[in-house]
Image: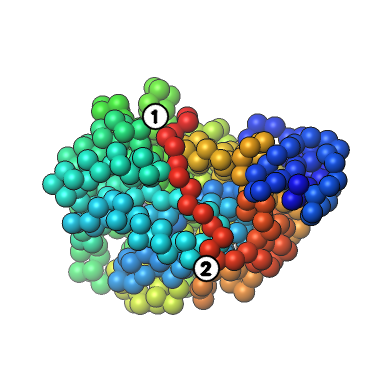
Amino acid sequence: MDLLIKNGTIISSTETYKADIAVKDGKIVAIGTQLPETAKTIVDAKGKLVLPGAIDVHTHLAMPFGGTVSADSYMTGTRAAACGGVTTVFDYPVQRKGNGIMSTINEKKAICEEEACIDYAFHCCITDINDGQIIEEMADAVAEGITSFKCFFVYKREGMMVDDGVFAQLLQRAKEVGAIINLHAENPDMIDLNVAKFKAEGKLSPWYHYLSRPEYVEAEADKRGIHWAKNLEAPLYLVHIADKEGLEAAIEAKKDGYDIFVETCPQYLEFTNEDYKRENGRNFVCQPPMKGQESQDALWKAIKTGAIDTVATDHCLQSYEKDWGKDDFTKIPNGCAGVENLYPYMLSAANEGKISFNRAVELCSSNPAKIFGCADKGSLTVGKDADIVIYDTTKEFTISVDNMHSEYDHTIWEGKTLKGYPVMTFSRGNLVYKEGEFLGKPGHGKFVKRVGRTV
Ligand code: URP
Ligand code: ZN
Ligand code: ZN
């Protein structure tokens, strides 16, 4: 045995129990009480929780976007992830007109082989189907372990939007090849209309970022996506849902038995549109924007009742670049960082009694693994990867740009105090984080070749 974690309280999505975990060659080989203490490394987790590593299924690392490149590289982004108890990240490479799926993915894979500190998988954003070639290639991509594809109903001017016809083709093909479509749902025409109006009126503060894309702008597109998925009987995963009306439509479709999955992000659970009125409101600019209190309440309700399937970050770090839009919200690059805050935030919510620890594990680890086909991840089970987080419920932690591990000059989470914090992260049995310190190394991360959905 390489590693024995003893005396801890293991948390799965359904159970809480005291047991030891033995690890060999990166895999969990035994779980039980009083396992033989023959391992090279023995960790006493008495009084601590032992959890499966989080899977952040929504990150944008080193992504060219908004006139810049998102500032966390695959190295710094996965380093930050490890320090927040995330042991797998899903990145979103963007396929562009004329390019294939696998050429887009392979370019990023080559970078990750050198840089990634934890395991990684890819969804591929499809922006142009290249006269149908992409539709054909989706089957090859699935065979290579790329079993999810993202469509944008927005970013028309950026050349990333797909129309309903393309979306319908992608939904149908995904169903045929055992994949799933992820959707960023907002109405681009209403955004353009509102932005033009506010610009003409000289209304340029970050508040108008929100007002140009308020609840109804997201709701229309959520409902449109759900409409097509229902009628074409294809699975659909709605990314970063932030509005009540769209969420409720998704919940209805789920109740009717459709394969609709819903993701939200910690920023929508913590912040509201009011945060755009702050002096540093530009730092909160992301798309979709934070919504009003009513939407946030609906999100929390769905977190509690089980209607939301996953929480992921949409980690898209923009640092000093946010200042470009100091006097004009249209110049603010979209995106906020959060990969290091996801698991601590959700676990702190559990520690405060808002949800159970089991539910936090379900949202951040086991459901992501099931929906996106990570066969070796998502639970502490014999035979799975030893991606393990040890969590101290008594540790108080206040987030600051100075104690985070991303490449940035600010964090929207500055000053947020969490009840409890991860104290160790193991990636396939290797200690990559301990008590504030990153101990992993670039190149350790491995590509996660996925199978189809198991829920
Ligand atoms: O503002 C955001 N979310 N930027 C990243 C790209 C996207 O829309 O997911
Ligand atoms: Zn998006
Ligand atoms: Zn995103």
Instruction: Tell me: residue 176, above or below residue 316.
Output: above
Query: Which residue is farthest top?
Result: 256
The answer to whether 89 appears left or right of 107 in the picture is right
Q: Quote the CA–CA distance across marks 2 and 1.
A: 35 Å
Viewed as shown, does residue 405 lie left or right of 192?
right
Q: Is mark 2 within 8 Å of ligand 1?
A: no
109 relative to 301, above or below: below
User: Mark 2, mark 1: which one is toward the viewer?
Assistant: 2
Residue under the image location 35 percent in, 77 percent down: 324
Q: Which residue is mark 1?
A: 259
Q: Earlier in the sequence, mark 2 or mark 1?
A: 2
- Residue at numbered disc 2: 76
The residue at the point 50 percent across, 41 percent down is 374
Mark 1 burial class by Cα count in 10 Å: few <14, some 14-19, many 20+? some
Q: Please identify the quarter of the rendering in which residue 362 is found.
A: top right
Q: How many marks?
A: 2
- Give the answer, above or below, for where 26 lies relative to 224: below
Give the percent coordinates (x, y) of residue 388: 67, 48
* Position of residue 342 measured from the top left corner of the image (x, y, whole percent): 57, 54
Residue 385 position in % (x across, y down) = 61, 44
Could you say whether the residue bearing mark 1 is in a helix, strand or loop?
Answer: loop
Judged from the image, the secondary structure of the residue bearing numbered disc 2 is helix
Rendered residue at 68%/42% (across/down)? 28
Q: Amino acid at mark 1?
A: Asp
Q: Name the residue type under label 2.
A: Thr
Please name whichever residue, 306 or 388, is drawn nearer the observer in this view of the structure.
388
Q: Position of residue 322 (x, y in %)?
A: 40, 73
